[in-house]
Image (cartoon, helix red, strand yellow):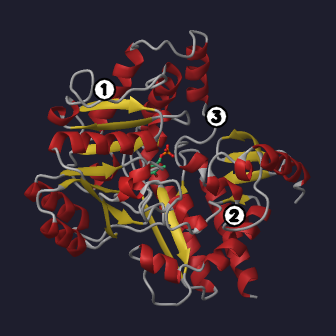
Amino acid sequence: MNTTQSEALFAKAQELIPGGVNSPVRAFRSVGGTPRFIERGEGACIWDADGNRYIDYVLSWGPLVLGHAHPKVVAALQNALTRGTSYGAPTALETELAELVIDTVPSIEMIRFVNSGTEATMSALRLARAFTGREMIIKMAGCYHGHADMLLVQAGSGVATLGLPDSPGVPASTTAKTLTVEFNDLEGIQVLFEEHPNEIAAVIVEPIAANMGFVLPQEGYLQGIQSLCRQYGTLFILDEVMTGFRVAPGGAQAAWNLDPDITCLGKVIGGGLPVGAYAGKREIMKMVAPSGSMYQAGTLSGNPLAMTAGLATIHALLEPNVFETMAKSTTTLIEGIQAAADSVNLPIQVGCAGSMFGFYFLKEKGTFINDYAVAKRYAHTERYAKFFHAMLEAGVYLAPSQFEAGFMSSVHSEEIIQQTIQTASRVMKQLTA
Ligand SMILES: *Cc1c(COP(=O)(O)O)cnc(C)c1O
């Protein structure tokens, strides 16, 4: 595979942009090699600057649930663009997307749009602290909620990949009120509540820990967090930035019957444009300025292009059978990967939910990754790196890190999925030869 152009572009980018990228995981640090510079995407595929084609399972890290340049999204955006890009004044589009999200996600009664998932979680926590008059928060090790200071404690995603325990530049005073406990450790949360019964403003959790690979919640875990929150007057914040419109159209909360006080959204609801949102019970959301006293604002928040892309994407996703077909494709793919690994005796742990999936190569057979500590110990990152590069060479673009999830789109055809499975099977044979 010729990658001359990507290499040249990367060399220049590294002179001008830290690490050559605008978000760390893009740089391939955990798998090595040169990141591909992408020129164009269409449907299930992307093409790099050297003209190589890849079947894409990153999909901009989740937002592109309809694949690249979906005709309906492109048409809606072209139409919106001719009317200008932003006014800094309210538009009907914002209410339209608000209504659509509220109708689809069970717990949400009011919503505020922001520009990223980071802003969503940051604002949600400010709101929880304002609403409860408390300062402490609980987060789970390996859960990633964006890069706000107070949340860069045992964070997953790029932080997991780069192996940074924390980030310099984050004052100890901003993380002093952030308590952490392993994912799936309900007892650990209970202990923290008992130690600080009147001090915890919120528990924030990813319903699937999908920024440290792909770890499903154990039966009763999320429900247990919800009950503890109710018991202690603490707000339950479900970070559905990734799982929203992915695990089910109504998110993990719809699939698993949860009732969070505040939900964070992003990714899919922007249809590939920069968006985030925090949303929840009317009583709580009414505290946000200007209806209430908790300040939060944004020059480009709710801008017409992002709203348009979000609306077109969600409408298409909610059409009959679209979600179900995509979920079935995800199961087919992950079962195929499992079978390929089994046939050459490579220990692997796979998982999927709706249109998200993940798999870990394991250092030892019989281990099960249930939290971040175990993921760091038993995930075979070297094997993943080899697998990743062989897949890339063969035209399949997976996340350039063992600690990230994969995504399916509605336009990944049966043929493309079978082709992916065959490629994975061939690559795993090579790895074990
Ligand atoms: C991606 C992600 C974020 C951060 O969103 P950005 O738009 O990258 O700021 C927050 N929480 C979760 C669960 C995410 O997956």
Disc 2 crowd rating (10 Å Cα; few below 14, some 14-19, many 20+) is some
Query: Is residue 174 found left or right of 33 in the rendered image?
Result: left
Residue 399 location in percent, x, y? 62, 60
Q: What residue type is labelled 2?
A: Arg
The answer, for residue 412, to whether it is visible in the render is no
Query: Is residue 318 found left or right of 84 in the rendered image?
Result: left
Q: Distance between the residues labelled 1 and 2?
A: 41 Å
Give the residue at mark 1.
99
The answer, for residue 215, to whether it is visible in the render is yes
Who is closer to the viewer here, 99 or 263? 263
Query: Residue visible at 21% across and 39% down?
Result: 130
Give the residue at mark 3.
69
Instruction: Tell which circle, 1 or 2, labels the residue nearer the N-terminal end.
Output: 2
- Circle 1: element type: helix
- Asked if the residue under mark 1 is in contact with the one under mark 3, i.e. CB atoms within 8 Å, the reply is no
Label 1 lies in ligand 1 vicinity (Cβ under 8 Å): no
Q: Distance between the residues labelled 2 and 3?
A: 28 Å
In this rendering, the label closer to the viewer, 3 or 1: 1
Residue 181 location in percent, x, y? 31, 70
Disc 1 crowd rating (10 Å Cα; few below 14, some 14-19, many 20+) is some
Give the residue at mark 2.
29
- Circle 2: element type: loop
